[in-house]
Image: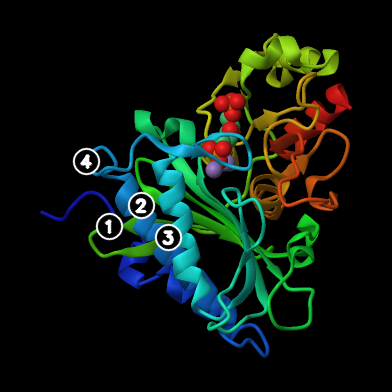
Amino acid sequence: MEPTHSWGPPHPEQLGWTLDRHILERQRSTPDATGDFTGLFQSIALAGRMIASRVHKAGLSDVLGRAGETNVQGEEVQKLDVLANQVLVRCVEAGGHVCVMASEENEDIIPIPAHFPHGKYVLMFDPLDGSSNIDVCMSIGTIFSIHRRTSKSGPGTREDCLQKGTSQVAAGYILYGSSTVLVYTTGDGVHGFTLDPLVGEFFLSHENIRIPKRGSTYSVNEGNTSKWSPGMREWVQWLKSDEAPGGKPYGLRYIGTLVADFHRTLLKGGVFAYPGDVKNPNGKLRLLYECAPMAFIAEAAGGAASTGTQRVLDVEPETLHDRVPLFIGSADDVADAVRHVS
Ligand code: AHG
Ligand code: MN
Ligand code: MN
């Protein structure tokens, strides 16, 4: 008896569409590509697989809880923050593809040891995003941003890191959730890859992600309402009323991990917000390794990202750990937010 269902097109896995192959295809179509970008991406993907392995058995290995120190952000550092940071630095520094790195967990730049070659790229990252969710088994992530160096040669400098979001070569994140998904863009399309832990490879699972022009959810920590500006309070009140677009209130979704809240917004539409408030006028999220990479992805998928007063990608960084308010997601939803809060 013939099966009644069609299996549809072969699954990407069957086509061998791994992340490596996707990056190699891009390299082949880039005139005078040197393979440096490919090598850097492979190092990042290796780090992601190593972090995923620890995250997904965190309860069984001694990586839960606090590391007993505070970082430059003045936050309690979790053991997994430290581990993820070390894994990324170790996986990338020897490859000769970067001249300097910067991390949420390091106050100053991370130099490349003198005995390794210094490459043409700059890598900045939030090694473990959503640290407060580690111990309760909620989704967490890693965020990365890649620039080309501005200095000529030799060891990279802080100025190499202090570049506007528009000059990113690539940006991406790894979401350690019900599955491990790596999403990246080089500005030309946004693509997602799901890790098959048994094979140890990321396979293409979300080709050319486009964010809907408008969604039906908003994502914000309403616990901060009393500290918001009147415009911010009005905007959220409006979304919760029958005057909201579509004539019915938006739903609230908030995990407290930027990577997870953004990934849902990217796939389903809607808007994520971490605004400034009376206590922290620039909000909580960091420009170089949280807001700018996410903004690069959002815009490449047809969405938008604003500080409330300007495009995130246009912000000129002054220090490695600058914070900016963030409104990111569907173009129409972000435009509504900016209209209320600016
Ligand atoms: P990190 O764990 O790297 O410090 O980032 C946490 C950030 C971000 O992931 C999330 O959107 C935000 O903190 C949540 O902040 P609140 O707990 O104040 O809502
Ligand atoms: Mn973070
Ligand atoms: Mn972090």
- The answer to whether mark 4 and mark 1 are in CB contact below 8 A is no
Q: Amino acid at mark 4?
A: Leu
Question: What is the distance, in whole Å, between disc 4 and disc 1 at their CAs?
Answer: 18 Å
Sooner in the amino-acid sequence: mark 4 or mark 3 = 4
Q: Which residue is mark 3?
A: 87
Q: Is mark 3 within 8 Å of ligand 3?
A: no
First reached walking from the N terminus: tag 3 or tag 1: 3
Of tags 2 and 3, which is closer to the observer? 3
Residue 60, which numbered label?
4
Q: Residue at x 34, y 65 (%)?
A: 201
Residue drawn at (81%, 52%) of the image = 317
Mark 3 or mark 1, whichever is nearer to me:
3
The picture places residue 274, in percent across and down from the top left corner, at 69, 29
Rendered image quadrant of residue 296? bottom right
List x then y, in percent, for residue 325.
76, 34
Q: Nearer the viewer, mark 1 or mark 2?
A: 2
Q: Position of residue 224 (x, y in %)?
A: 67, 16
- Circle 1: element type: loop
Q: Which residue is mark 2?
A: 52
Image marks 1 and 2: residues in contact by CB distance under 8 Å: yes
- The answer for how far apart the CA atoms under marks 1 and 2 are is 9 Å
Circle 2/circle 4 CB separation < 8 Å: no
- Which mark's residue is nearer the viewer, 2 or 4? 4
Q: In the rendering, which numbered label is found on residue 197?
A: 1
Q: Disc 1 residue type?
A: Pro
Q: Where is ligand 3, by quadrant?
A: top right
Q: Residues within 10 Å of mark 4 (few under 14, many from 20)?
A: few
